[in-house]
């Protein structure tokens, strides 16, 4: 990755990227690329949520205990610049990111699901022929770089 982000655990990481980059690399590879700049290889990585819409979002815990529902959050944007991935740190939206993960935890418990969860809104919209709004629409200006 062209830029190096050093993560200090415990932290929840929210990656924002394009659907094209997500489709090319996948959530697991994006997580690996973000974590490769961190020096502690013994930290547990737990993929939580991937949502693909007009933007793609990948959320994972880096050294966060399973009972911590409000960890610190680092929000990153990954772009493709001259065929290399470039990572930029964005403003913290801790409350929003944690509320999404906590809501998914409740949904998981209710329906017997587990993490990681992948929701591809594009497929749902294609099947239904609708566009119910996007995460970017709900976040508004918080998503802009």
Image (cartoon, grey):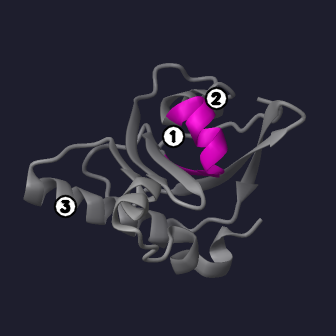
Tell whether 65 sits left or right of 5.
left
- For discs 1 and 2, the disc positioned in front in the rendered view: 2
Mark 1 or 2, nearer chain start = 1
Label 2 neighbour load within 10 Å: few <14, some 14-19, many 20+:
many
Residue 33 - label: 2
Q: Secondary structure at mark 3?
A: helix
**Which quadrant of the rendered structure holds the N terminus?**
top right
Q: Residue at x 58, y 41 (%)?
A: 22
Mark 3 or 2, nearer chain start = 2
Q: Residue at x 71, y 60 (%)?
A: 90
Q: Secondary structure at mark 1?
A: loop
Residue 9 - label: 1
Q: Secondary structure at mark 2?
A: helix
* x then y, percent, for residue 67: 25, 51
Q: Residue at x 37, y 69 (%)?
A: 99
Of residue 15 and residue 8, the one placed in the foreground of this image is 15
* Residue, disc 3: 107
Q: Are marks 1 and 2 in contact (CB under 8 Å)?
A: no
What range is drawn magenta here? Answer: 12-26
């Amino acid at each position: 990755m062209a830029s190096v982000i050093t993560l200090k655990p415990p932290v929840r990481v929210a990656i924002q990227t394009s659907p094209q980059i997500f489709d090319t690399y996948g959530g697991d590879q994006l997580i690996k690329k973000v974590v490769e700049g961190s020096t502690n290889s013994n930290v547990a990585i737990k993929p939580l949520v991937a949502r693909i819409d007009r933007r793609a979002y990948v959320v994972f815990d880096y050294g966060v205990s399973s009972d911590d529902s409000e960890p610190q959050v680092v929000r990153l944007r990954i772009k493709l610049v001259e065929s290399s991935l470039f990572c930029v740190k964005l403003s913290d939206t801790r409350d929003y990111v944690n509320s999404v993960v906590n809501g998914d935890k409740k949904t998981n418990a209710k329906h017997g699901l587990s993490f990681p969860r992948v929701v591809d809104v594009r497929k749902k919209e294609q099947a239904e022929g609708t566009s119910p709004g996007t995460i970017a629409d709900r976040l508004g200006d918080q998503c802009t770089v």
